[in-house]
Amino acid sequence: MSENENQNKNTEEETSAASDFETGSITVEKNGHFIHCLTIIGQIEGHYILPSQNKTTKYEHVIPQLVAIEESKEIEGLLIILNTVGGDVEAGLAIAELLSTMKTPTASLVLGGGHSIGVPLAVSCRKSFIVPSATMTVHPVRLNGLVLGVPQTLSYFEKMQDRIVNFVETNSKISAEDFRSLMMKTGELIMDVGTVLDGDGAVQSGLIDELGGLSNALEFLNKTIEEENAECSGQ
């Protein structure tokens, strides 16, 4: 290979690495396994572009990455790191539905906050972890801007809320009744109804599987990968 070709290859690798870091996405090798780390931070952007000063996670960037990870022969596990205030309900639920149907071993880790639509995202993986200092806000579905005060609007809200409740119940240990109780609790949020859970509270409620950090999530992924590889070898 010529010197120019080497330089071009190095430039391409550096550009790819820089792009990965900009999107908060990187693949690392640990214990011989390639685990992809994907961050969901700030506000989840849906059909409308948010102001440039907002930290956002764009669903049109995340969804193709999830498809690529599922189809990849090299990537054996996926770690989702969450620190989000929530955002577009349908976009967040779409990402959560994709995560819940992946065959690739997945784990989620809530750092800082996993609020609003971040709750379904946190429970969508095979196992969810939360650090003690993190918080999660559970509240009813709400929309910003002009909303028509007609029965059809109320019906839409109820159906969307049912979708979220059913998803959380299916993918965690909390019952639909208990989750709705957290959603509709009064007196805890000054300007809203809902509940704020810290790390320990999220685990005790059954919303999150385990209190832990990065090492715990990676340990789970490595163990799951090795178990599944052993099963495939046995067959």
Image (cartoon, rainbow, N blue to C red):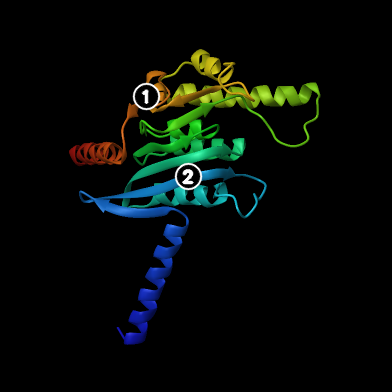
Q: Could you tell me how far apart the alpha carbons at marks 1 and 2 are, in whole angstroms? A: 22 Å
* Quadrant housing residue 152: top right
Q: Label 1 neighbourhood size at 10 Å, few (<14), some (14-19), many (20+)? A: some
Q: Position of residue 158 (x, y in %)?
A: 66, 22
Q: Secondary structure at mark 1?
A: helix
Question: Is residue 151 at all visible to an observer of this figure?
Answer: yes
Relative to 21, residue 62 above or below: above
Given residues 191 and 61, the one toward you in this image is: 191
Of residues 116 and 220, the one nearer the viewer is 116
Residue 185 got which mark? Answer: none
Question: Disc 2 on helix, strand or loop?
Answer: strand
Q: Amino acid at mark 1?
A: Asp
Amino acid on which disc 2 is placed: Ile
Q: Residue at x 40, y 75 (%)?
A: 11
**Does residue 170 appear left or right of residue 126 in this picture?**
right
- Please report the residue visible at 51 percent of the width from the left and 47 percent of the height from the top: 63
Residue position for label 1: 200
Give the left or right position of residue 176, taking residue 90 as reference.
left
CB within 8 Å, label 1 to label 2: no
Q: Residue furthest front?
A: 190
N-term mark: 1 or 2: 2
Q: Position of residue 232 (x, y in %)?
A: 24, 40
Foreground residue, 105 or 121?
121
Say which residue label 2 marks: 40
In the image, what residue occupies the spot 30% across and 83% down? 1
Q: Residue at x 57, y 16 (%)?
A: 185
Q: In which quadrant of the rendered image does the C terminus lie?
A: top left
Where residue 135 sits in the image (x, y, percent)? 45, 31
